[in-house]
Amino acid sequence: MPPESQIPPPSLDAPSRATPETHHRGQDKVARIPVKVEPLAEPLRKPSWIRARAPIGPGVTRIKRLLREGLATDLASALAAEKASFLAMSATADFAEGVRAFCERRPARFGQPEKLAAGAAPTAPQGVHHPL
């Protein structure tokens, strides 16, 4: 191997700059690739295990509203609104199902028809402390 002092510096001039007429660009360059990718008539759908299942309902609407309003209000008011919303939503069957599913390490099954009575605390699995 020659000493570093004898190694010529790398050329900063690309061949295409010296003779641009001999180098392909854009569509001409892509046309030379031997493998052609033909787009499908209709794109394939994502498998069901990849597709997101966005929740819908009054809870999601409430969260979105709080987020929008929180941008234009002071911190104390935003925290008070968030606390009131949390207390209201924590009395729902979906909240209890979310806590239960988390503790049991399984996917949650939201939207079940059973609802908690007004003012009733959601039931958590044994040994789990509910914050309310």
Image (cartoon, rainbow, N blue to C red):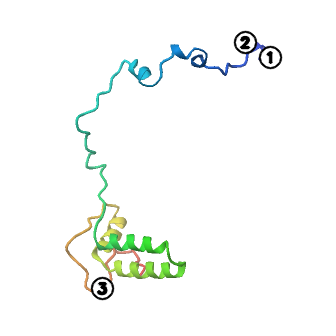
Disc 2 target residue: 1
Q: Cα distance, mark 1 to mark 3?
A: 83 Å
Q: Residue at 53% of width from left, 81% of height from top? A: 76
21 lies left or right of 3: left
User: Residue 5 got which mark?
Assistant: 1
- Please provide percent x and percent y for residue 75: 54, 78
Q: What element carries label 2?
A: loop
Q: Which residue lies furthest to the bottom in this view?
A: 119
For disc 2, the neighbor class at 10 Å (few under 14, some 14 to 19, many from 20) is few
Q: Earlier in the sequence, mark 2 or mark 3?
A: 2
Quadrant location, the N terminus:
top right
Q: Is mark 1 on a helix, strand or loop?
A: helix
95 lies above or below 4: below
Disc 3 target residue: 120
- Please provide percent x and percent y for residue 25: 47, 22
Of residues 7 and 18, the one nearer the viewer is: 18
Q: Cα distance, mark 2 to mark 3?
A: 82 Å
Front: mark 2 or 1: 1
Mark 2 belongs to which amino acid? Met
Mark 1 belongs to which amino acid? Ser
Mark 3 belongs to which amino acid? Ala
Q: Residue at 57% of width from left, 18% of height from top? A: 16
Marker count (numbered): 3
Q: What element carries label 3?
A: loop
For disc 3, the neighbor class at 10 Å (few under 14, some 14 to 19, many from 20) is few
Q: Which residue lies furthest to the right in this view?
A: 5
Quadrant location, the C terminus:
bottom left
- Please provide percent x and percent y for residue 97: 30, 70
- Please provide percent x and percent y for residue 124: 34, 75
